[in-house]
């Protein structure tokens, strides 16, 4: 029995009854736990790398010696390997993926577009270790016996394609990575291209352009932000890929100009050496590599999503 | 030469160029799709021969002793993923409910940002996290630490899909429930969630498909074992890890078992992905009544 | 109207979405066991006002309320009142039928029936409610099937049955026939008359003829220059439609705008 109170501003709580209080507590609790897990991830990586950061400082990134025995750790060869393989991957996957996306969005008849899209998307579902297996036993020998010599014959005068061809190495890793990220590029680019309004295409065709000219000179440029975002997203995935790369890169912490040479990536050195790491500085150095991977991936991913959102709306 | 002739000639050239470009685009699409078939084909051809009852049910044999299998790896995969699900589903669902109910505002946006961050973290870094939290302090590897890592991998997908699924239930259904005098708890859990269930199950299947093939975190969480292991508190064998170890070994018997294991992995992942697609299609049809 | 004849009334009720005032200072008394129609052009705040009567308005983002709504003499917005309890006493039927998609017809009807009943009592209650909604004969053989197979009109009657089964005192209806065909509309209009024997009904409608047909009392609302919905006139239906007291009411009824 309340007396008539003066009309006053009242913000009414939504979770008043006891059943709802318990529910609210559980929902809040779950969400807080979620946030804590992610923050904890970052914190643990920093804590784990601290001894290495304190010991090596900034030179960690610029040193090229990776000598566990002498406790000298430099990330440069790994950074080099990661950058080169990812670069090869995005070059190949970008071209193939965007071309495929153009075909699927604008040229393919529907009876062809659906199964092709399906197959390409299924590429993304293949486990990393299966890619590695195929890369090790099928692609690497193929590079060693066919692709490598062919490239060397034509381009062997450049430092990129000189030197002995082992089969495993930067090039093979780059190709495997390209296969792994091509679905990302193709699927997102196809969606972005398909979202370009029809009027634009029709206007271009009405002016007398061929379908191909419309696709390449009108549609692709208007979709370029989203497509670029797709490529950056794919790049982010390539940077962090571990198992397939580790199986085909040769695992040697050296910087060489030749793409046929074995190399090392940030992720694969952790995969290879973490369980063998003997000293705590060794472990800390590996965790610091993980931290570098984490930071780079977060930045790349954030950039990519910004670009894709600006074109597509939220994913 | 008249203008008309000129135009005709350049049009012909442009058309030819266009046809070339289209052919190139088609080639790229077929290259991508064909690579999948090539990889799948190899896995099937190389792997299916070694699949037999023994392979599925026996322990690995030491090198030199023929036969053996990945029985413990299969068991381990189920245990590790099952535990991961048990942890990821509540946390992911609750966070999704929070985001759907409290949509706008700085805190929900922060949570979504964190979820996006997590989805981009390489799985090896997540493995390091699991190591730091559950392996180093306890001084032993465990299946549970692998489950923890897998849980982190599954969370972003579950959170995002739960939120979307709950949001996609029409506002009028939720208001109808509340207008009857139901508590928020009953309205959300009893009415809205079941309506969103197909989408959430689809996401769960996809999340499981994703971690089934995940190997990197396992290297220093589950670590592997040669024996039957059902206790998640001890190192466990997981199929993806076994395939990796066999593949990089120098022994051809183990290598062929790697192909067989890869065949199992691919079959499982594809079955789950297709199952998810079918579920999604059925859910879409259900909503159209 | 003697005091105490109303079960539900508002006193100086205002409703906001954030800073935007949608309803301004509405004071209305809804007579017991009668049908009160609320009419007015789109945007006049009638639906918002209706949603304040069962505290559904506050479910929307950034929505708030000033003033009082009295149910049986008590302000439903006072701090110690549980909104859920209010909604059990003031039921609502929405513009588009919204049966719960994952529950059967029977479970939909019983969705908010008190827990203490046994199986027999529950089925009796469902039967009663479905009879009251004139739906029993059409669904009695398919109580366990999905409500999504029913027609629009049937689904809306199911929603009415569901609301009625919870045994409220007041039934709010937000343009209940807006999405239905004329035959379904006629069935529901008949229902409203029979339901008003037991319930106080407040029905928002944009259809003046429906208001004239169905209601005992009518309230006319209009948005003022700032877009705030105000109560212009409230009277017995017959009187409001033949001899309205306010010029604006007359303009609306005769179709000069709206």
Image: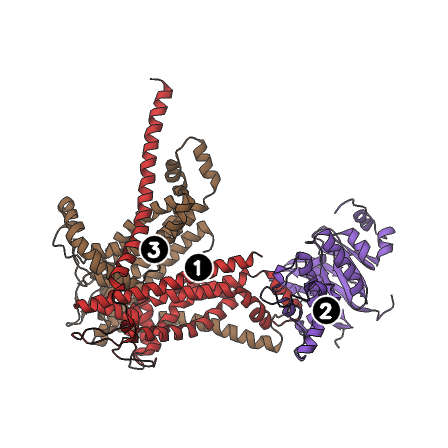
The location of residue A249, given as percent across then percent down, is 20, 60
Q: In which quarter of the image is the C terminus of chain A?
A: bottom left
Secondary structure found at label 3: helix
Drawn side of residue B30 relative to residue A264, left or right: right
In space, the residues marked 1 and 3 are separated at their CA atoms by 23 Å
Q: Quadrant of the N terminus of chain A?
A: bottom right
Residue nearer the viewer, C196 or A77: C196
Secondary structure found at label 1: helix
Image disc number at residue A234: 3
Within 10 Å of the Cα at label 2, are there few (<14), some (14-19), or many (20+) other Cα atoms?
many
Q: Mark 1 points at which residue?
A: B277
Q: Which of marks 1 and 3 is in front?
A: 1
* Quarter location, residue A86: bottom left
Which chain is mark 3 on? A
Image disc number at residue C129: 2
Image disc number at residue C216: none
Above or below, A229 against A40 in this view is above
Drawn side of residue C221 relative to residue B105, left or right: right
Q: What letter labels the chain drawn in purple?
A: C
Within 10 Å of the Cα at label 3, are there few (<14), some (14-19), or many (20+) other Cα atoms?
many
Above or below, A253 against A182 in this view is below
Asked if marks 2 and 1 touch (Cβ < 8 Å), the reply is: no
Asked if marks 2 and 3 touch (Cβ < 8 Å), the reply is: no
Residue nearer the viewer, A214 or B135: A214
Which chain is mark 2 on? C
Chain A's colour is brown
Which residue is pictured at 39% across the width and 69% down the height?
Answer: B152
The location of residue C140, given as percent across then percent down, is 68, 67
Above or below, A310 against A280 in this view is above
Residue nearer the viewer, A293 or C131: C131
Do we see residue B155 in this rendering? yes
């Amino acid at each position: 029995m309340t007396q008539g109170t003066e009309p006053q501003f009242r913000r009414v709580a939504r979770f008043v009854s006891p059943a709802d209080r318990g529910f609210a507590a559980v929902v809040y609790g779950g969400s807080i736990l979620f946030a804590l897990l992610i923050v904890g991830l970052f914190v643990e990586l920093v804590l784990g790398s601290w001894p290495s950061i304190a010991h090596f400082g900034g030179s960690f990134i610029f040193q090229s010696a990776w000598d566990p025995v002498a406790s000298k750790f430099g990330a440069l060869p790994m950074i080099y390997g990661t950058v080169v393989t990812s670069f090869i991957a995005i070059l190949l996957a970008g071209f193939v993926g965007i071309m495929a996306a153009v075909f699927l969005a604008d040229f393919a008849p529907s009876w062809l577009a659906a199964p092709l899209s399906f197959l390409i998307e299924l590429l993304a579902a293949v486990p990393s270790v299966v890619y590695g297996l195929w890369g090790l036993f099928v692609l690497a020998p193929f590079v060693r016996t066919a692709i490598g010599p062919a490239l060397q014959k034509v381009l062997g005068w450049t430092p990129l394609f000189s030197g002995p061809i082992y089969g495993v190495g930067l090039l093979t890793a780059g190709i495997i990575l390209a296969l792994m990220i091509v679905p990302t590029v193709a699927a997102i680019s196809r969606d972005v291209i398909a979202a370009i309004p029809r009027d634009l295409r029709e206007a271009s065709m009405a002016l007398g352009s061929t379908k191909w000219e419309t696709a390449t000179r009108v549609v692709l440029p208007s979709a370029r932000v989203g497509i670029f975002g797709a490529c950056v997203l794919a790049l982010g995935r390539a940077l962090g890929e571990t198992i397939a790369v580790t199986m085909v890169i040769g695992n040697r912490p050296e910087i060489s100009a030749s793409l046929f040479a074995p190399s090392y990536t940030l992720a694969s050195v952790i995969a290879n050496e973490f369980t063998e790491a003997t000293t705590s500085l060794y472990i800390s150095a590996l965790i610091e590599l993980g931290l570098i991977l984490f930071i780079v991936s977060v930045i790349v991913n954030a950039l990519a999503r910004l670009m894709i959102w600006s074109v597509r709306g939220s994913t | 030469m008249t203008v008309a002739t000129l135009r005709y000639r350049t049009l012909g050239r442009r058309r030819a160029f266009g046809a070339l470009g289209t052919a190139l685009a088609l080639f790229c699409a077929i290259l991508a799709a064909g690579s999948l078939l090539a990889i799948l084909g190899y896995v099937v051809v190389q792997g299916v021969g070694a699949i037999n009852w023994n392979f599925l049910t026996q322990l690995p044999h030491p090198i030199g002793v023929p036969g053996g299998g990945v029985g413990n790896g299969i068991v381990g995969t189920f245990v590790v993923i099952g535990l991961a699900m048990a942890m990821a589903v509540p946390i992911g669902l609750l966070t999704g409910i929070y985001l759907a109910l409290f949509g706008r505002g700085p805190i929900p946006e922060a949570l979504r940002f964190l979820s996006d961050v997590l989805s981009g973290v390489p799985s090896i870094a997540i493995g390091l996290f699991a190591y730091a939290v559950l392996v180093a302090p306890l001084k032993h590897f465990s299946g549970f630490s692998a489950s923890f890592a897998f849980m982190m991998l599954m969370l972003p997908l579950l959170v995002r899909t739960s939120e979307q699924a709950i949001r996609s239930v029409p506002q009028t259904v939720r208001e109808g429930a509340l207008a009857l005098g139901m508590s928020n708890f009953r309205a959300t859990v009893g009415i809205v969630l079941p309506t969103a269930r197909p989408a959430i199950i689809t996401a769960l299947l996809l999340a499981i498909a994703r971690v089934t093939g995940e190997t990197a975190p396992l290297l220093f969480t589950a670590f592997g074992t040669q024996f039957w292991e059902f206790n998640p508190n001890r190192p466990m064998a997981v199929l993806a890890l076994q395939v990796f170890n066999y593949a990089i070994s120098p022994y051809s018997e183990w290598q062929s078992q790697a192909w067989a294991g890869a065949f199992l992995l691919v079959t499982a992942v594809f079955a789950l992905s297709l199952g998810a697609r079918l579920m999604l299609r059925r859910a879409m049809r259900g909503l159209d009544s | 109207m003697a005091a105490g004849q109303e079960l539900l009334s508002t006193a100086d009720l205002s409703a906001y979405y954030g800073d935007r005032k949608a309803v301004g200072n509405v004071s209305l008394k809804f007579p017991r066991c009668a049908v009160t129609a609320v009419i007015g052009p789109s945007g006049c705040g009638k639906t918002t006002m209706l949603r304040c009567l069962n505290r559904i308005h506050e479910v929307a983002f950034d929505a708030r309320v000033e003033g009082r709504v009295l149910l049986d003499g008590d302000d439903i917005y006072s701090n110690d009142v549980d909104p859920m309890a209010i909604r059990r006493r003031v039921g609502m039927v929405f513009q588009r039928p919204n049966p719960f998609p994952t529950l059967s017809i029977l479970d939909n009807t019983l969705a908010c029936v008190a827990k203490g009943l046994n199986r027999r009592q529950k089925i009796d209650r469902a039967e009663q409610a479905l009879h009251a909604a004139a739906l029993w004969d059409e669904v009695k053989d398919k109580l366990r099937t999905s409500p999504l197979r029913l027609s629009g009109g049937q689904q809306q009657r199911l929603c009415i049955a569901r609301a009625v089964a919870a045994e409220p005192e007041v039934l709010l209806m937000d343009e209940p026939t807006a999405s239905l065909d004329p035959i379904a509309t006629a069935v529901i209009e008949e229902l409203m008359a029979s339901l008003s024997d037991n319930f106080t009904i407040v029905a928002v409608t944009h259809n003046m003829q429906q208001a004239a047909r169905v209601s005992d009392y009518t309230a006319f609302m209009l948005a003022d220059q700032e877009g705030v919905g105000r109560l212009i006139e409230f009277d017995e239906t017959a009187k409001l439609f033949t001899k309205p007291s306010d010029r604006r009411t007359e303009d609306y009824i005769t179709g000069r705008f709206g």
